[in-house]
Image (tube, rainbow, N blue to C red):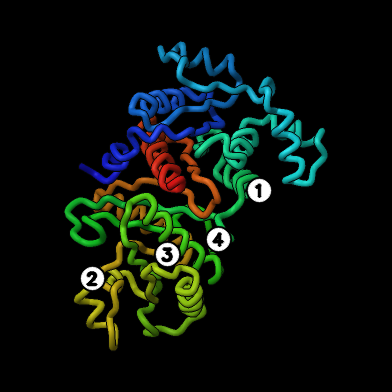
């Protein structure tokens, strides 16, 4: 059983309240119904109620066990508008206009605790979705920047965690500062513990291994490592490593002078120095190793949520639902 199938199985029975700001999209309705039948979620579809019901009818899906909300007609719009007005510093009149938009209504519902998690991005761009989430929902304590990770399930690979690695960040931050890179590492470690129940072994990647090269880009990774070690107490983080030193113990022992440590050659989480490296690496792994790449999964926010590719399939969305449901359930515990 692959890692995503295990996650879908683990999400069964959690019954988390997941809100969908693109509730009229047929893929959302189909995926939400599949998840509801497996008792992963209690779905909340937000949008034009007439359109949602018409699309559900076309799909022959009964919405009896769905919560369908049209923000413009919601009995909570006044309450949400006042809440958003206080949160954003805008007038109540302006807040009322903003919160009638499904993405803002859904974000406020999640922030207030009227939903356990949120999934969007089929219609909204990733930039818009992340901006709204950052402004309304806010960041996890101690984390300053949103980021993402991919779960890479690599056939016949014996390293990582049973042939699985986590890559971060591969979709959000083009050129993070040392402080931001440290936050990405810590957020990824937290995500891996909550979602996969691993003991993360986090490698901070570079084109240098423990001082083998001198360059400002290397210095950034070294600085990020020191910050991450202070912030991520209890998480194994080490570096700076070239990819082979992070993944191949024999190579790590040859390249590293002195103690190798618990991460070198045995990493299960790879933190890339910038978006070029992360994005190129996950796509090369997909193509050359025939790996399954699950993500991007957003992290660093104070509430569980996930962004979707606009080309996502029903099964892709079901995977995102499983991930968000598991994280939401474990945060409650």
Neighbourhood count class around disc 3 (C-alpha, 10 Å): few under 14, some 14–19, many 20 upward: many
Marks 4 and 2 sit apart, C-alpha to C-alpha, by 31 Å
Q: Residue at x 80, y 36 (%)?
A: 92
Q: Residue at x 74, y 29 (%)?
A: 78
Label 4 secondary element: loop
Locate residue 42: give its quadrant. Answer: top left
Marks 2 and 1 sit apart, C-alpha to C-alpha, by 41 Å
Q: Is residue 151 visible?
A: yes
Which of the numbered marks, if any, corresponds to residue 272?
A: 3
Of mark 1 and mark 3, the one earlier in the sequence is 1
Label 1 secondary element: helix
Label 2 secondary element: loop
Q: Is residue 245 visible?
A: no
The residue pinned by badge 1 equals 135
The residue pinned by badge 2 equals 248
Which of the numbered marks, if any, corresponds to residue 216?
A: none
Of mark 3 and mark 4, the one earlier in the sequence is 4
* Position of residue 68 measured from the top left corner of the image (x, y, whole percent): 55, 21
Neighbourhood count class around disc 1 (C-alpha, 10 Å): few under 14, some 14–19, many 20 upward: few
Marks 3 and 4 sit apart, C-alpha to C-alpha, by 18 Å
Of mark 2 and mark 1, the one earlier in the sequence is 1
Say if 276 sits above or below 136 in the image.
below
């Amino acid at each position: 059983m692959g890692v995503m199938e295990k996650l879908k199985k683990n999400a069964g029975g959690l019954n988390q309240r997941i809100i969908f700001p693109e509730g009229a999209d047929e893929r959302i309705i189909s995926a939400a119904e599949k998840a509801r039948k497996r008792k992963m979620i209690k779905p909340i579809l937000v949008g034009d109620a007439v359109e949602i019901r018409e699309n559900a009818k076309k799909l022959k899906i009964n919405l009896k066990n769905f919560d369908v909300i049209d923000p413009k007609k919601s009995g909570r719009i006044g309450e949400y508008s006042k809440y958003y007005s206080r949160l954003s510093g805008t007038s109540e009149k302006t807040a009322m206009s903003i919160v009638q938009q499904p993405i803002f209504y859904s974000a406020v519902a999640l922030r207030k605790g009227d939903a356990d998690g949120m999934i969007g991005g089929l219609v909204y761009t990733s930039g818009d979705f992340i901006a709204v989430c950052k402004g309304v929902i806010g960041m996890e304590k101690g984390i300053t920047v949103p980021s993402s990770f991919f779960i890479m399930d690599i056939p016949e690979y014996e390293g990582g965690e049973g042939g699985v690695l986590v890559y971060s960040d591969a979709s959000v931050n083009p050129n993070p500062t040392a402080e931001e890179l440290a936050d990405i590492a810590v957020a990824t470690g937290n995500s891996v513990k909550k979602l996969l129940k691993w003991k993360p072994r986090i490698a901070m990647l570079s084109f240098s291994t423990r001082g083998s090269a001198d360059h400002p880009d290397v210095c950034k990774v070294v600085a990020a490592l020191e910050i991450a070690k202070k912030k991520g107490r209890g998480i194994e983080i080490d570096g700076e490593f070239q990819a082979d030193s992070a993944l191949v113990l024999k190579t790590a022992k040859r390249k590293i002078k002195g103690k190798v440590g618990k991460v070198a050659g045995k990493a299960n989480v790879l933190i890339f120095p910038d978006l070029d490296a992360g994005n190129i690496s996950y796509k090369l792994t997909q193509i050359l190793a025939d790996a399954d790449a699950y993500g991007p999964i957003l992290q660093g926010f104070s509430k569980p949520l996930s962004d979707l590719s606009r080309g996502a399939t029903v099964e892709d969305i079901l995977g995102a639902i499983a991930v968000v449901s598991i994280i939401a359930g474990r945060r409650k515990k």
